[in-house]
Image (cartoon, rainbow, N blue to C red):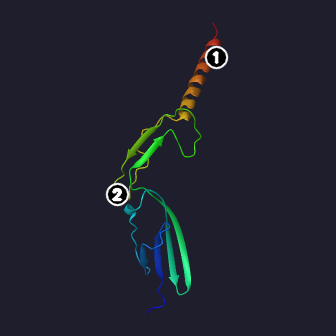
């Protein structure tokens, strides 16, 4: 028996039994299709003789369609009737390209309206003061 080998156990969330028992170095493929969408924790425990090392990695799974909501953000304080624009789309199985909002129609932000109204107000003010200061 080789006493220089460590044994590594991989756990998902608070499961009592590991999903894998490995002798590193090794490449491990985590299959997220068996997990529900949401927050999870990957816990890796390595044991060598009577010593133990632990690494905990929180991650989020999104196997289902991406859902975008415009008009309500996390932890907003709201009241009354709130119009929401909803969009949902599947990103496919291609892991190297994830669409991040490029397909979502968006409302015009408030700062754009403020900028447009400020320019129009300045233009009206400039026009009126120019007309009043012209010699007749």
The answer to whether marks 2 and 1 mark residues whose Cβ atoms lie closer than 8 Å is: no
Instruction: Name the residue nearer the viewer: 38 or 97.
Output: 38
The kind of secondary structure element at disc 1 is helix
User: Is residue 125 depicted above or below 71 in this figure?
Assistant: above
Q: Residues within 10 Å of mark 2 (few under 14, many from 20)?
A: few
Which label belongs to residue 86? none
Q: In the rendering, at what x and y percent does residue 96 appear?
A: 38, 58
Q: Residues within 10 Å of mark 1 (few under 14, many from 20)?
A: few
Q: Quadrant of the N terminus?
A: bottom left
Q: Residue furthest bottom?
A: 1
Give the left or right position of residue 54, taking residue 25 as reference.
right
Q: In percent of the image, x 50 and y 70: which residue is there?
A: 43
User: Is residue 25 depicted above or below 109 in this figure?
Assistant: below
Instruction: Name the residue nearer the viewer: 62 or 99.
Output: 62
Q: Residue furthest front?
A: 16
Determine which quarter of the picture holds residue 37.
bottom left
Q: In percent of the image, x 57 and y 30: which residue is there?
A: 114
Q: Quadrant of the C terminus?
A: top right
Q: In percent of the image, x 47 and y 86: which residue is there?
A: 5
The kind of secondary structure element at disc 2 is loop
Visible in this render: residue 42?
yes
Visible in this render: residue 103?
no
Give the left or right position of residue 56, taking residue 102 as reference.
right
Instruction: Name the residue nearer the viewer: 100 or 86.
Output: 86
Name the residue carrying label 1: 129
Name the residue carrying label 2: 94
Q: In the rendering, at what x and y percent does residue 34 appear?
A: 38, 63
Q: In percent of the image, x 55 and y 80: which residue is there?
A: 52
């Amino acid at each position: 028996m080789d006493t220089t080998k460590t044994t590594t156990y991989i756990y998902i969330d608070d499961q009592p039994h590991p999903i894998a028992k490995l002798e590193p170095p090794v490449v491990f493929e985590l299959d997220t299709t068996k997990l529900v969408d949401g927050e999870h924790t990957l816990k890796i425990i390595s044991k060598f003789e009577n010593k133990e090392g632990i690494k905990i990695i929180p991650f989020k799974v999104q196997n289902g369609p991406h859902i975008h909501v415009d008009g309500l953000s996390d932890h907003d304080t709201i009241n009354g009737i709130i119009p929401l624009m909803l969009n949902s789309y599947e990103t496919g199985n291609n892991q190297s390209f994830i669409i991040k909002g490029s397909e979502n129609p968006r409302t015009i932000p408030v700062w754009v309206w403020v900028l447009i109204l400020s320019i129009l107000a300045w233009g009206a003010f400039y026009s009126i003061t120019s007309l009043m200061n012209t010699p007749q």
